[in-house]
Structure formats: C-alpha cells, structure tokens
Image (cartoon, rainbow, N blue to C red):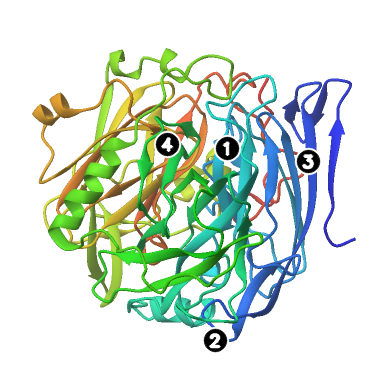
Amino acid sequence: MVFSTRMIFAVLFLCVSATCVIAGDPTLEHEWKVTYGTIAPLGVPQQGILINGQFPGPAINCTSNNNIVVNVFNQLDEPFLLTWAGIQQRKNSWQDGTPGAMCPILPGKNYTYRFQVKDQIGTYFYFPTTALHRASGGIGMLKVHSRPLIPIPYDNPAEEYPVLLGDWYNKGHKTLKSILDSGRSIGRPDGIQINGQSSKVGDANAKPLFTFEAGKTYKLRVCNVGLRLSVNFRVQGHTMKVVEVEGSHTVQNLYDSLDLHVGQCMSVLVTADQTPKDYYFVASSRFAQHPLSTVAVIRYANGNGAASPELPPPPPDSTKGIAWSISQFRSFRWNLTSNAARPNPQGSYKYGKINITRTIKIANSRSSSNGKLRFGINGVSHVDAETPLKLAEYYGVADKVFTYNLMKDEPQEGNKVEVAPNVVNGTYRNFVEIIFENHEKTIQTWHLDGFSFFAVAIEPGRWSAEKRKNYNLLDAVSRNTIQVYPNSWAAVMTTLDNAGMWNLRSEMRERAYLGQQLYLSVVSEARSLRDEYSLPETQELCGIVKSLPKPAPYT
C-alpha cells in the first residue's frame, strides 16, 4: 500500500529511537514515496516533486501531543530532506529536517522521521530543504488540532479546507538551482498557484476549490508556500474572521482581505451567507513590480450562477500599502483568555515582564563573492557543510567543521561577506530579543525553527533602544515567522528553552540558498535527557563523523 496512516494507542511507556513517548499519546504512522511526476500549476506541464503521487502532498492531520512517524522513501535522483515548519521538535532537533541538523536521504534510500507535536495546535506545512526542491513541490499541510477536552474559542466549523498558495516558476528546480549556482538571480516568478492550480476569471472549465452549503461556517487553513512574493487573499462577497496565526488563537477580527507573507500560515472562518452561486477566491502578489494574480472557484451547493467578473480590489501598494500591511499586522492580537494546547489561558505567560538577557540585531544584505550573487546576515553568508552542524557538535568535532560566532550581534559596516557556515551560540534558557533590520528595497520574511517568538513590533526606519517603548508587551502573537518591510525593522522575543541546533532563515528560498540564514546552537551543559534527546539509534551519519565512535548518550 503506497500510503498508510495508522493510529496506535500505546498502553505502556515506550521509547522509540531514544525519543520518549508518553503512554496514551496516539501515534500516527505514514509511509511516503517521493517521486518525480508531471504537474502544471500554471497550465504549463513540467516535472514536479510528488509525495505518493500527489501535489500538494498528503496532509498530516493530527492532534496536540500526537506522535508522528513518517517513513520517507527518496525515489528522486538527488539527496532529499523535509522540514516541518513551525513544529518545535521539543528536545529533538535531530528530526528538524534541515541540512545543519541531519544528513539527507540519499537516492534510493529511506528515513523514518519520529517526532511529537508537543503542546502545539495550529496550521503548519512541510517542505524540502535540500537544493531548490521546494520550487517543484514536495509541499503539504500539517494540521494540529486541539485535544477534545480543551475547547477552542469558536464553534466547530462545518468543514475545514487546506489552501496552499504562493508564487510559482515554470522552470524546474534543477534549472533554478543552476541559475543560482552560476551567480545570478532566478528573477521574478511566472504566476501564483492555489493548491497546485491556477485559473482566470471566466474560465468555464475551472474546477471548484471547495464547496459551501448556505448558512454554514467553514474554516480555511491558508499557507503561503511560495519562494519569493507576499500574497494578499480574499473571498469575493465574504468577510473572513481570523482565529489562529501560526499556532496561536487570536482576537477574532473581521477582514475583507489578508496579507500573507512567504512561509506564513493562518486560519480564517468564512460563513456562507451570500446568494447561493459561485464566488472567487482571489490571490494576488504584494509589493511586486510586476503584479501577479489568480483565482479559484468557491461553489455553493445547489447554487445557480457563475462568479461575478468584478473581483474585490487588492489593498494599496507602495508606501501606502506598507502602512496598510503594518496596520493589519498590529491588529493581530493574542487571545489572552482562550486556551492554548494546554488547559490554561494563553495570557497566563507574562512575556512582557521577563528581563532581556541578550539582544541580537541582524541586518540582511545582498552582495557578491568572487563575482557571484550572495546574501548574508551581519557580514556572513552561510554555506552548508558536508557534515551536519549538529552531528559535528554532538561528536565533539565542531572545530573541524565550523567556527562559532563568526557573526556578531550587531551588523557590520560595509557590504563584504564571509562565506562560511554561520553558527551562533545561544545560552540555554536565556530570554533574547532579536531585531531584524531590512535596509533593502524588498520585503523580507524570517522563520525560526525550534521556537515560537512574540512578534512585539514592526516599524519603518532604524531600530534603537528607545523603540522598546513601542513594543506590544501584553498580547503580541506567539508565532514562528515575521515579515520585515523595506527600510523597516521588526522585533521579536523568545526564551531559548529548547536545546538543539536550530535554523533561523530567510523564507525567500533564493536568499536562504545563497546564504541568508544561520544556525542557533542551544546547548544544555547538563547533557541530560531532561533537556535534549540523545542521537537516535537509527540516525543516518555522514561527513567526518561517519567512522567515529558514537559518544555516550545523555542520561
């Protein structure tokens, strides 16, 4: 059987590959085959990356604290890895799926991921971190539901639908990678896709994205899985109520349209309260010199009539559009009275009263090295090492693979970059403030693995210490991505309470591939299973550690 999902309820305490599973936590098992196949998201046939013959790939539909087992068979002709963006992988960066944390799955081989969605709810997605594979597929949604005993702050919807949208290139991943390897930019995308399809207004052959029944309310889980462009989405004739952003329940405001930046996810409720007929779901690019858009049909059951060709207008662009988008960001607030994944209110965690122990201020840059395009952070442009950074650290040979703290906590003068693995030490359990400054003319989106952070501020201009008086220290949303507008800054706060090797990266895949990322090494000196799991027995080894004796496990 190509695809299987099984729920196994453990009756005894069980340890799987050194990752402890608490008795009673269900286990979901998946078997995935990764292959090439023909897809046509923009109507142009091309080679895509499929999972079990599907693009987008199969959804993982789980509940908080479930244990997830995914056996991935790589039937491509290149090494392959998947990451689970937004899943915190508590004590378990071994399963994070980034090249700095684990060895890739070689062609013709398989690897079984084992992780727990510990104390999380929300909307996430998985994607390939190797090469430019994300440009050709291998993407799917990961939905984490609240446990039945913990109520959610809204009525259960009649149905929920996944919406994976984003920009798309008609060139395949190998062509795009060769362009970047030659020192050039991949340029602007060719269009926008929604769940692997695109359509135009008036297309009589367009299949409905999903079907509504009049009077019922539906939950749309929406993620921007593109490579480059922020997207605005809207539902013709309907308002949307935001109820969740990247794992946090939010204050429930109504919106006509919503900006969603690369790598971000949110959940909205839409009530089918209009005349039964067809309506358009609209997605259009934001802050792009050459605007792109697409539509998909939402069909009312027993409806009569085509969707109107008059589409809801996009929000303003340029300077006014940035102000509009910042205002919308500020309207997203943590719902302090709703339960999180645990049966206690989200607002019971008083992050605004914790003393900051370290400020890391980073600035992205575009430059060249040996005549080739590179992107960097504070003067360092990351490259992956043959030996994953986490393995080198665990085996005690980090000095043979990388140098800690090449990147400083402040941006450097000038535009030169050092091309090397970028690893920054983080002190376990410190409460840190990260400032993102964007001195460029294009919007940025950043993602941090292993943690969620409080997105406390976004403002135009340059950051300074007195800007802290403008922080939202009460109900900022706890999330895992943050956008930074051109010539603007953003501030986030988080506690480094998750030991491991964690990737902080640009969500623009071109920029991450060419160096705009780093790894945050968070080490517990106790070497205790209380803080971090030992190297799993089944973990693949590569690089210089392959022939080394295995270190003693944590106790």
Q: How far from the left and from the top, in percent, is residue 461?
A: 10, 46
Q: Which residue is mark 3?
A: 28
Q: Residue 479, labelled with which disc? A: 4
Q: Residue 44, labelled with which disc? A: 2
In the displayed structure, would residue 262 be above or below residue 429? below
In the displayed structure, would residue 271 be above or below residue 229? above
Q: Is residue 542 left or right of residue 168?
A: right
- How busy is the neighbourhood of tag 3: few (under 14 within 10 Å), some, or many (20 plus)? many
Q: How far from the left and from the top, in percent, is residue 161?
A: 61, 52
Q: Which residue is mark 1?
A: 394
Which residue occupies 10% across, 34% down?
464
Q: Quadrant of the C terminus?
A: top right
In the displayed structure, would residue 518 be above or below residue 344? below
| Distance between mark 1 and mark 2 Cα atoms | 46 Å
> Could you tell me which secondary element the residue under label 1 belongs to?
helix
- How busy is the neighbourhood of tag 4: few (under 14 within 10 Å), some, or many (20 plus)? many
> Are circles 1 and 4 on residues that touch, CB within 8 Å?
no
